[in-house]
Image (cartoon, grey):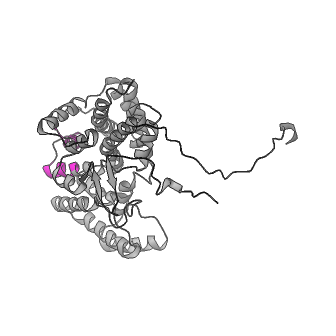
């Protein structure tokens, strides 16, 4: 009897977790038992980051102390800044993120796991600082200050990016986006982190593994691809006609469907609402209308629903985020989930080593080189 092979490990239970439940009813998502709807509407990203790392929502005092630590961790060593300045502007931003994470690991060695919570907080604060210092220096020739009066990570990101305090609406949208991207169970990048952590490697190495995995277009680049798609069209009618042609040619449309969700992505309604609000606030609803027309077409023609990435594209655009930084922003959020999973893996560790079904040549006799 042939062994059953699950390519891509689809449907294979590879471990247990207390951090997140995904798609058990086909379209639900919970962080540590809390529904994503409640968190996206009422919580701040710092509350959610604390929840993922420590298992419970923080009290007022715990949250204030946590945010103070995160602010202190924004500072980067001079050598790290000098190295970021040497990375060319045409480098893929995800390569910059991966390199920056590895570099920090060289200066801040995690020799044991006794301070792993502190390491997780450091990585969470340092990733936005690394990303935006490199971007502003390489693209604008500006050495930005990494200090800011913004207490929230959402406000901090927008402040460093645009050089001024962001509008409250933009900060609220960025905060919601960070919450929605923060965690998603055993997705590809998180599993990569756990595989690395299972070898008892350091947290920086495990996070770098996640960043490298998220760089792949089948995992983290869908929001960038969605932005490139919707920007091609000037009207929703043009979008519909071109999408119909693309579908007839069986071209892949990024930002639709999901490996886990069956009926809809529970995160989509929140980001879609934000896209609509920001489009009205900007005074130009074209991108939103085009996105909505594409959504309707994909549902009617292919019975596919938009995932989180699709409307995130227009949200980031309305906030002034360059398209090439969409996936690095994903990192700035998902690092919370990654670190939580790394810590959970360490707490009950077993080396992750699956078995492969060999399909190569049968046993062959060695032929000496002179006789070949």
Q: Which region is colored magenta?
A: 150-175
Q: Quadrant of residue 53?
A: top left
Residue that sits furthest to the left in the current view: 60
Residue 146 in the image, given as x and y percentages of width and height: 24, 32
Closer to us: 12 or 53: 12
Residue that sits furthest to the front in the current view: 1
Residue that sits furthest to the right in the current view: 371
Instruction: Check residue 49 for magenta coloring.
Output: no
Q: Is residue 299 above or below residue 163?
A: below
Would residue 208 be found to the left or right of residue 179 on screen? right
Magenta span: predominant SS is: helix
Q: Is residue 130 above or below residue 9?
A: above
Residue 349 in the image, given as x and y percentages of width and height: 43, 37
Quarter of the figure with the N terminus:
bottom right
Q: Can the viewer see residue 113? A: yes
Q: Quadrant of residue 244?
A: bottom left
Q: Is residue 197 above or below residue 291?
A: above
Would residue 345 be found to the left or right of residue 32 on screen? right
For the image, the number of numbered tags is 0
Residue at position x 57%, y 58% in the image: 4
Residue 335 in the image, given as x and y percentages of width and height: 33, 41
Q: Quadrant of residue 260?
A: bottom left
Q: Is residue 305 above or below residue 140?
A: below
Closer to us: 352 or 243: 352
Quarter of the figure with the C terminus:
top right
Instruction: Check residue 168 for magenta coloring.
Output: yes
Residue 350 in the image, given as x and y percentages of width and height: 46, 38
Q: Can the viewer see residue 149? A: no
Closer to us: 308 or 249: 308
Would residue 49 be found to the left or right of residue 113 on screen? left
């Amino acid at each position: 009897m042939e062994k059953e092979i699950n390519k891509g490990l689809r449907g294979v239970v590879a471990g247990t977790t207390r951090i997140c439940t995904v798609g058990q009813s086909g379209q639900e998502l919970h962080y540590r038992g809390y529904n994503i709807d409640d968190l996206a509407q009422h919580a701040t990203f710092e509350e959610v980051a604390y929840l993922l790392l420590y298992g419970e929502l923080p009290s007022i005092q715990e949250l204030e102390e946590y945010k103070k630590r995160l602010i202190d961790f924004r500072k980067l060593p001079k050598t790290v800044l000098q190295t970021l300045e040497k990375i060319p502007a045409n480098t893929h931003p995800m390569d910059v993120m991966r390199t920056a994470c590895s570099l920090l690991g060289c200066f801040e060695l995690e020799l044991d796991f006794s301070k792993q919570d502190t390491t997780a907080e450091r990585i969470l604060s340092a990733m936005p600082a690394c990303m935006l210092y490199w971007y502003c220096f390489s693209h604008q020739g500006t050495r930005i200050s990494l200090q800011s009066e913004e207490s929230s990570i959402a406000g901090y990101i927008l402040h460093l990016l645009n050089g001024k305090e962001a509008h409250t609406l933009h900060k609220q949208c960025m905060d919601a986006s960070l919450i929605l991207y923060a965690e998603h169970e055993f997705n590809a990048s998180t599993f990569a982190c756990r595989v690395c952590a299972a070898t008892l490697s350091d947290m920086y190495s495990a996070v770098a593994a996640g960043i490298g995995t998220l760089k792949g277009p089948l995992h983290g680049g869908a929001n960038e691809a969605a932005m490139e798609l919707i920007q091609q069209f000037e009207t929703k009618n043009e979008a519909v006609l071109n999408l119909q042609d693309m579908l007839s040619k069986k071209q892949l449309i990024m930002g639709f469907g999901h490996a886990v969700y069956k009926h809809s992505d529970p995160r989509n309604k929140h980001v879609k609402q934000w896209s609509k609000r920001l489009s009205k606030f900007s005074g130009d609803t074209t991108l939103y209308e085009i996105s909505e027309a594409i959504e309707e077409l994909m549902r009617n023609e292919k019975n596919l629903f938009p995932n989180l990435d699709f409307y995130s594209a227009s949200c980031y655009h309305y906030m002034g985020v360059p398209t090439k930084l969409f996936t690095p922003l994903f990192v700035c959020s998902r690092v919370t989930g990654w670190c939580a999973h790394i810590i959970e893996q360490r707490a009950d560790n077993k080396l992750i080593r699956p078995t492969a079904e060999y399909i190569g040549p049968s046993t062959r006799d060695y032929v000496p080189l002179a006789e070949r």
